Amino acid sequence: MDFFILSLIKAAIIAFVLLTTLAYLQWIERKVIAHIQLRVGPYRVGPHGLLQPLADVVKLITKEGVVPSHVNKVFYLMAPFVAVALALISIAVIPFGPQITIGPVTTWMQLTDLNVGILFVLAVSSVGVYGVALGGWASNNKYALLGGLRSSAQMISYELPLALAVASPLLLANTLSFREMVNYQSGYWLGFIPRWNVWPEILGFVVFLIAAFAETNRVPFDLPEAENELVAGFHVEYSSMKFAAFFMAEYANMVTVTAVATLLFLGGWQPPFPEPYSDFVPILIFAAAGVVALYHGLHPARRMDKFTFPATGLLFLGIAVIFGVSLLVPVLKTILMALFWFCGKLGILLFLFIWVRATLPRFRYDQLMRFAWTFLFPLSMVNLLITGLIVALSSK
Amino acid sequence: MTALIFFLFASIAVFCGISLVTQTHPIASALSLIGVMGSLAILYLQLGGEFIAAAQVIVYAGAIMVLFVFVIMLLNAGAEGTSLQMSNFAKYAGIFVLAAFLGLISFVIQAMLPKTEGVVFGAFQGGTALNIGRKLFTTYLLPFEVTSVLILIAILGAMVLARREI
Amino acid sequence: MPTSVPVSWYLILSAILFGLGVAGFIYRRNIITVFMSIELMLNAVNLTFITFSYTLKQVDGHIFSFFVMVVAAAEAAVGLAIILTVFKNRETLMIDDVSSMKY
């Protein structure tokens, strides 16, 4: 029975943190894209636009939900629900850290570990195509139908290079569960180079990232859902909460796919250099960020920053103090260090997603499909063949 | 617990199967078939076939059924008209009577058969990817190669048949 | 409600699904629905294979089931291409209307 209660507590924590992260991921995206384009982004709603996601949620909830006439009501209402549910389910097998012992309870920082965990994530992303296809078809609108068909054809075409790029680290680690995969990547060569899968599998990592961009319908592959192409594609007839559901599903897919990339290629929660030295990295980073924020708070460029920059500086210094204190408490140290490295790598990959969105133009649809079938799929197969050859020759 | 999961997903599978056969719109039939495949994947998990359950969802529900849904959307297949001229009462009462009759017959037959063992979740640990891969590439290597040639023929056939005549 | 389910109930479920597939194959007129009833029959057979693999404690049933899935995928691809060709030439999806070679 305490297995159920423990799982319920973990599920509640993960759901709460994930939903907050999805809302603030949109804030981060708007700010980063704005600063790349030399403007400010959301600025007025709360200090530096921090309450903008809250305002967006209130707007989307209170907007009038227009259901067009002659739509197939059952599928129209079911499609965003399916998209969101499947996007949130696949977080269940992602491990955030190693085994921890809080009081009498010993548990992993993971909701559940399937020994076919990687296949579970692939299966959920395969079935997630239906949310898009049904949403486009049920809208009784030829542009939505075309957008939905194009988007689902794109998603199933890029599933193949994704699965083959995933298969190469599986060959190296000889396991299908995420926990074992991260344990395989522990340890260091020559004492300081981490045994991450990205060093032997750099081609697989690049192929996985490109296929991940296409799977989540992000730029440069977002032709089926861009606002100025095909009248915003498959979600043109959706308003208020159902549109918010599609949006949330896209961001949740992004988080899932970057988490899988971190676990398979970048070593999960393992630090990049050995233990005693890597404990000081979070303290140094947050202390440096706090000092920089306090320095800029002395001569702020805008009137509001006389208050917000010192406040942010003190907040970062407080986090650095928490990390410093946790070095003395072993349980807290394990949790905080694992979360710091995992979320750090996740954040770098998400920043890469947002950076690419602000920089690259989008592919035309036939260029997109040709790229998948004539370039990415043979490349991932060659990668798998070379990996298999090396594994077969080196394991006598 | 095992019995609860079995009854829940078996009834979902039978319900979706009946809905597949009786719905008028092909898209509703396609979604019912996806429901059948999903509940069968859970039953495979109970019987220890974890790799086959994942393969069922990835290949069957996630690729083959997407192909079906594409073709239905492309051909704009509408709801077919019903040709049965029965009254509503006859249809619903008939289904119920048929189901009750089949249930009674199967219960009677099953009570006369010798007792079989119960299914215990976790009693068969051999359905891992390791075992399947081992058997697939040693004992069943010839069927494996033959099916890869079969898929190649199917790809070529589908491309030739669905090609646009220029 | 017994705490464990006898293996024969899985086989009964498989027989029920196979019977439903046969009923759909015989009674439906839309060609795509007929095709989906065939897929339902193949799924029922997969369940039988996995059940017997559990009973005999061998993994060969899983491999047979895997081959059934592969053959179903190939058959779905070619069958749907044929359906597209029939639709292009006859403009109809009802199998009763594709009867020009009848006596």
Image (cartoon, helix red, strand yellow):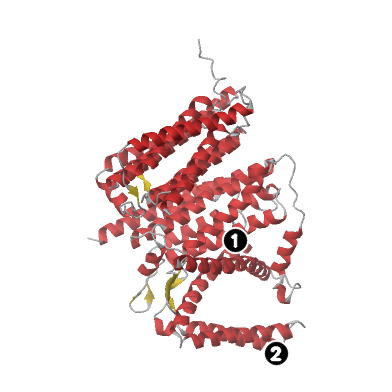
Picture coordinates of residue A37, whole percent (x, y):
68, 68
On residue A251, which mark appears?
Answer: 1
Residue C24, compared with residue A282, is above or below; it is: above
On residue A298, which mark appears?
Answer: 2
Residue in front for this viewpoint, A278 or B90: B90
Secondary structure at numbered mark 2:
helix
Secondary structure at numbered mark 1:
helix
Q: Nearer the viewer, mark 2 or mark 1?
A: 1
Task: Tell me which numbered mark, 2 or 1, is placed earlier along the sequence.
Answer: 1
**Chain at numbered mark 2:** A
Which of the 4 image quarters holds residue A1?
bottom left
Q: Residue at x 74, y 52 (%)?
A: A65
Callout 1: few (<14), some (14-19), or many (20+) C-alpha neighbours within 10 Å?
many
Q: What is the residue that sits farthest to the top in this orientation?
A: C103
On residue B44, which mark appears?
Answer: none
Asked whether residue A202 appears in the rendered view, the answer is yes
Q: CA distance from mark 2 to mark 1?
A: 37 Å
**Chain at numbered mark 1:** A
Q: Please name the amino acid that badge 2 sits on.
A: Leu
